[in-house]
Amino acid sequence: MALPQLTWPNGPAALGPDLATVAKAVDEAGFEYLSVMDHCFQISRYGPPEREMLEAYTTLGFLAAHTSRVKLLTLVSGVIYRHPGLLAKAVTTLDVLSGGRAILGIGAGWNEEEAKGLGFPFPPLKERFEQLEDALRYVLQMWAEGDDAFSGKHFEAERLLNSPQSLQRPHPPILIGGSGEKKTLRFVAQYADVCNLFPGPDLPHKLDVLKQHCAAVGRDYDEITKTVALWLDIGENGEKTGQLLDELGQLAELGVHAAMGWIPGVPDPRVIEKFGTDIIPTL
């Protein structure tokens, strides 16, 4: 389940208690994942930029304290927002404090309005992908044994010391978001454990491209967990439950393992509980 929209009826003063209630309901309903966006402005799909948006890793730490089993991640962190050393440290910290439930969600970043608004660097796409590959290599080295120096196209570091290390070994799973065929899916095959794609007519083709990249780098395609970003709408009174189950079944036939998406009606925990009784047990 994803939490991309935090403009909730009780307002900012109640976001802490409301998030705690939602997290507990998600954990108990049996969801595999709980994700937040890594943005500072709201994105246009969910509303104007002025709407509420919490910093991602502070929020994930809070969610970790109110859950015991669900896996926690951003969907996804733009590489331009954090130096990879700080990003690896944040995910490691989340992994340690959550008892080994952190996932690194990462991508090249796209929100130019937000970056320029806050004064973050926003280089051209080619450079952002170079930074993404640097960051992937960097975090994997930081989670490995030893503390050697790192040298990439855009990042240099003298000593990749990471203490304590992550509880998940050899490292927390890495999810790469996006479906670009030349670079993003190649990076998934080369570096990632999980991909996140969009459902639609071209999904079978995207999965086939990923399979080709896996073959090219000698990676077992079946090792990679395939997820999609899906609107999880069962209707106000559950009238769309059958339609959603059909869609999830079709995705499963393609080899998709999980859907991560927003549930209309959240933060009302009853809608989450309904997934725990009517959707998740049937999958």
Image (tube, rainbow, N blue to C red):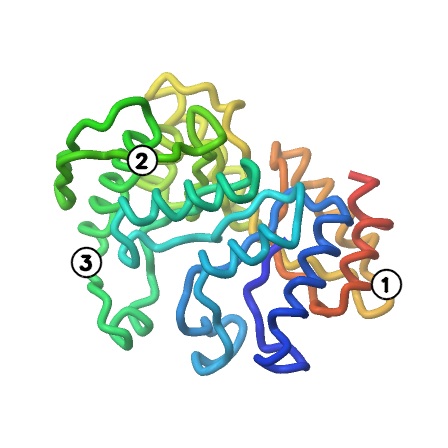
Q: Nearer the viewer, residue 204 or 259?
A: 259
Give the label on residue 239, or none. Answer: 1
Residue bearing mark 2: 162
Amino acid type indicated by mark 3: Pro
Disc 2 from disc 1: Cα separation: 50 Å
Residue 127 falls left or right of residue 51: left
Is residue 25 depicted above or below 203 in this figure? below
Q: Looking at the rendering, in which quadrant would you find the C terminus?
A: top right
Whether the residues at callouts 3 and 1 have beta carbons within 8 Å, the answer is no
Amino acid type indicated by mark 1: Glu
Spot the residue most to the top: 218
Residue 152 falls left or right of residue 169: left
Neighbour class for label 3 at 10 Å: few (<14), some, many (≥20)? few
Amino acid type indicated by mark 2: Asn
Closer to the eye: label 2 or 1: 2
The spot of residue 104 in percent (x, y) is 43, 43
